[in-house]
Image: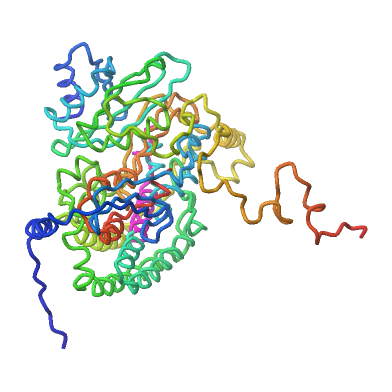
Amino acid sequence: MTALELAQQLKARFNDLIADPVEFRGEATVKIRDAERIAEVCACAKNDLGFDYLVDLSSVDNYGDDPRFTVVYELYGYGHRCHLRLKTDVSEEKYELPTVTAVWRAANWHEREIYDMMGLRFRGHPDLRRILMWEGYPYFPLRKDFPLSGKPSELPEAACTRPAPLQGGPFVTVDGGKDSTVREPRARLPEN
Amino acid sequence: MATVQDIEFKDPAARASAANEELRDMQGEKMVLNMGPSHPATHGVLRIVLELDGEIITKAEPDIGYLHRGDEKIAENMTYTQFIPYTDRLDYLAPLANNVAYALAVEKLHGIQQDLPPRCQYIRVMCCELARISSHLLGLGAFAMDVGALTVFLHTFTEREKIYNLIEALTGARFTTTYTRIGGVSRDLPPGWTDQCRKFLHEVVVNFDESEKLLTRNRIFVDRTRDIGVISKADAIDYGLSGPNLRGSGIDYDLRKAHPYLVYDQLKFDIPTGSVGDCYDRYLVRMEEMRQSVRILHQCLDQLPDGPVSISNGKTVLPPKEKVLTKMEELIHQFILVTQGENAPPGEIYFGAENPKGELGFYINSRGGGTPHRLKIRAPSFVNLGILSHMLPGCMMSDTVSILGSLDFVMGECDR
């Protein structure tokens, strides 16, 4: 059985909820029109179609488009060895969708990562906290409106807030400080 | 003459239930222990907050992200080729394998995977397998060292040094290889490299035997790994494990066999699997995988075809320098490739390769142009570590070290 046939089977079960499968480079992609029902579709894909392995879960920020976010599920079945991609859109106003942790426990950390990086909330997730950034970090760095150079933010209660041992020392360059010829006691200017 | 002594083991289920029986009445006050982020057994910067009842772990909370560099964000802001050096820094114990996996993913997006010249494919396979041996040698050495067998670590490091010499001769760097290009590899094998590689393969097998003699029937090692950290088949799939950790649990799944890429379908090798899914099985699987890698490398060296090492249409890989300096068309290709990158078709692909640590996958969402709109890295170590909070509770505190060693993760890849 091919991935496209499995995608057609999934469509046959949910009819209008699912758009026609698209094939690109030998991979079948299926779009789910209503993000609210993603958990239901995933459970069906796992239990009835044999997609027992959640390979990856990622998110895309379509900045400037509406709906703004896309969540992408990469599924795989050990039985039939087919790969299927499910996609669903989430709007910026809502930024919430049901969790699939009940279907595959692997989704736990993936969903936490998406929450951390994109700011999408997964309803019903057992432990939705930041995973890569620290607790209390105010931004969502993978959003397209977050600059590559980053934004300054406070590190609450982080261990490194004390001055470093060499801070302010003669050989350390500080922003806006004197340049090394002035700062460095051993530096000799040519005329000396 | 040495005598062979058989070691008897109780059935794992019986052992576990006996231990539970013993500990049922021993409910004490809970203690929280912070392990890491810089702990010798956490191999990098993993932090685990353990809740202990005596020596038994009742709750484990892994805390990751100490090595987060925002690779996915960086990838969105540069051309596909420019991101290759960043892949070195994912699984920094097997940079060559990452280079190959990433190049293959981008080539899949471009639809040029089939156009790769055979010599390039063979060289890439050899890179992957050398990286696998190197990564497993370190993984095993560190694993053995964590459970108290320091000698193995010294043994395996001697061999890794030889691999690094080979890699240095091949790529010019020992760690940060950046060897592949989209549509090929950066340079051909240097003269005499295949002979050096053959010599190394003969030496490394001896080293495997020595390491195995030190570990496989070593009473202390076996006691500390057998029936420890058992992952059932169902759990392994549910948590999305991949690589040796998945195969250790008895699932016969290897991307090199299941969905062959490069020339893996023309090479003969076996996929070792475990039967119990404990730390010992994962050790055995890695040991055997290295032997299979040696087998693959021998075949590659024997079959290595001549020919170009890159696609030579000029629009994918940089054209030869002498032509760039003398011909107009090549100059234009060079300029476009360097400044804008090759125009990718709009679309999305996922490509996973069997890396030493597991399935390293790249999901690329392209809207055309030379940069990805979104590049998601499916890091095997990230997914493999997700099972920790499930498997650690119920284990002894000292088992944590064996379990972490047997999972063989790299934080550079986990945190990206």
Prevailing SS of the magenta stretch: helix
> Is residue B275 in view?
no
State which quarter of the image contains the N terminus of chain B: bottom left
Q: Nearer the viewer, residue B381 or A121?
A: A121
* Farthest residue, direction right: A191
Magenta segment: does it hold B223?
Answer: no
Percent position of residue B7, x then y: 11, 73
Q: Nearer the viewer, residue A62 or B50?
A: B50
Percent position of residue B373, x then y: 45, 27
Q: Nearer the viewer, residue B356 or B70?
A: B70
Percent position of residue B196, x then y: 41, 68
* Farthest residue, direction top: A16
Q: What's the image's color scheme?
A: rainbow
Is B277 positioned to the left or the right of B353 in the image? left
Q: To which quarter of the image does residue A79 belong?
A: top left
Is A128 positioned to the left or the right of B179 in the image? left
Specify start and end residues of the magenta stretch as a single range. B109-135
